[in-house]
Amino acid sequence: MKFKIFISSVQKEFEAERAALREYLRADPMLRRFFEPFVFEDKAAADQSAVALYMNEIGQCEVYIGIFGNQYGTEDANGFSATHQEFDEATRRGKYRLIFVKGLDDSQRHPKMRALVQHAGAQLIRRRFSTFSELMAGVYAALVDYLAAHELLRDVPFDAALCRDAKLEDLSEEKISWFLQLARHSRGLPLTDDTKMRDVLAHLNLLKNDLPTNAAMLLFGKNPQRFLISSEVKCAHFHGTSVSKPIPFYQIFKGTLFDLVNQSVNFVLSKIDLAVGTRARGPQAPVAYEIPPEVVSEAIVNAVAHRDYTSNGSVQVMLFSDRLEVWNPGTLPPPLTLEKLRQPHGSVPVNPLIAEPLYLTKYIERMGTGISDMVERCREAGLKEPEFRLTDGFVITIRRKSGRAFEAVGGIAPQVTGQVTGQVGKLLRCLKNQEMSRKEIMEAMHLKGRDNFEKQYLSIALENSLIERTIPEKPNSRLQKYRLTKKGAEYIKKQSKKH
């Protein structure tokens, strides 16, 4: 979230100060995260009057900084300078105004500028300065106060702070009802299914002044990314071992934290090997993924639950041919270190109010055992231990092992990646010995959701070269149909022999 700052005064008197102030705001490590300054010199030539430009920019800003000196400036037909008009416009629009007056002696000021200083002083507290350093210090202190007032600089955790501009109506009663049922069943949450939304939120400490906190919005919002844009998760699948374009498969997931975890885990599981054995040893055929689903889930839940939500970065889930990497914009909370992470340790949640509902629904454990569980499950699966590192965020790397899933069920790995049993297997069998359009396939398979069909069936089969288009040079042709490739036909043949 960035606030636009309008820096007033087009007079040559403060040309150097305006430029220096702009660069200072853009360079300061903290202020640049929250503010984007505008000065007149930033605008290119345009068929628009300067006054109209100022008024428009003031309307788009959140903060107005007025720098008043000795000069009043060129007056319009009504006897008002641009600086005076800017201040009045900011006042009329209810903008947050910060006024800095150069010098302690008003006797040298133009009479109208002296009147403007007095006019501003009657409405708000103005700050005087003599040097540029004093101006910078004054601006910095005022903007820090502004951030604190908007609870962006807090003495409470991010998840406990109010979600800016959000109301209770922005939360989903349906999602809270789902949570209630799952939490009661999973951990014995002492609330009944008909508990009112406000009472549920109060029980979970997700209200502040009867308004939703950031945690409430992330967990139960109708559209969390409307208020917290970077809370989305970006997932990408690369065929090689490095990031390269074009990305074969890329998707951005939005929704509540529960939605993000579910969607991201499903994304990974749909791309890695899945093997199904025979019923030789029991009534149910054994099933194994290349990477245990619990490991995938723990890595993603860890990133979503413990990330730094004040960062503009998003959680990234990247699947390469040799590894899975999950990155989040965050770090380890004290006293944890990379060395201590692998040892028994207590739970130290970065976002405690987010962690509690995730615990109540069994998305996470409370005792800090998630990392050790990941390590142990990878060992049991014959995979290398997960790697943890701190770069410009926290990264978990899980190494892949070709054929591991098929070894686990006592089978032989076909030369196919991705989920080729289940949904995709049905698609391949549907196309056996015939060409069909998308509509015909969906009707034959009794499917209705086109988006789900694209993601879970068609795209995976195309990506693995199990099927092909009949008109490859025109993928969106209305006459487009699909057929099995030689590879797809061989896979169907092998599956038929097994059963």
Image: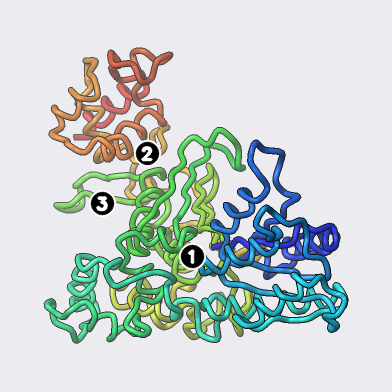
Q: Which residue is mark 1?
A: 303
**Mark 1 → mark 2, Cα distance in angstroms:** 34 Å
Which of the marked residues, 1 or 2, is nearer the chain's N terminus? 1
Q: Which residue is mark 2?
A: 412
Tell me: 128 left or right of 308.
right
Tell me: 227 left or right of 276.
right
Q: Secondary structure at mark 3?
A: loop
Q: Secondary structure at mark 2?
A: loop
Residue 238 position (above or below residue 472) = below
Query: Which quarter of the figure is the C terminus placed in?
Result: top left
Image quadrant assignment for residue 19: bottom right
Between 428 and 233, the residue placed more toward the observer is: 233
Q: Which residue is mark 3?
A: 286
Q: Residues within 10 Å of mark 3 (few under 14, many from 20)?
A: some
Q: Residues within 10 Å of mark 2 (few under 14, many from 20)?
A: some
The structure residue drawn at horizontal position 55% and vertical position 82%, both measured from the top left corner, is: 154
**Mark 3 → mark 1, Cα distance in angstroms:** 30 Å
The kind of residue tagged 1 is Ala
Image quadrant assignment for residue 380: bottom left
Residue 496 position (above or below residue 392) = above
Q: Are marks 3 and 1 in contact (CB under 8 Å)?
A: no
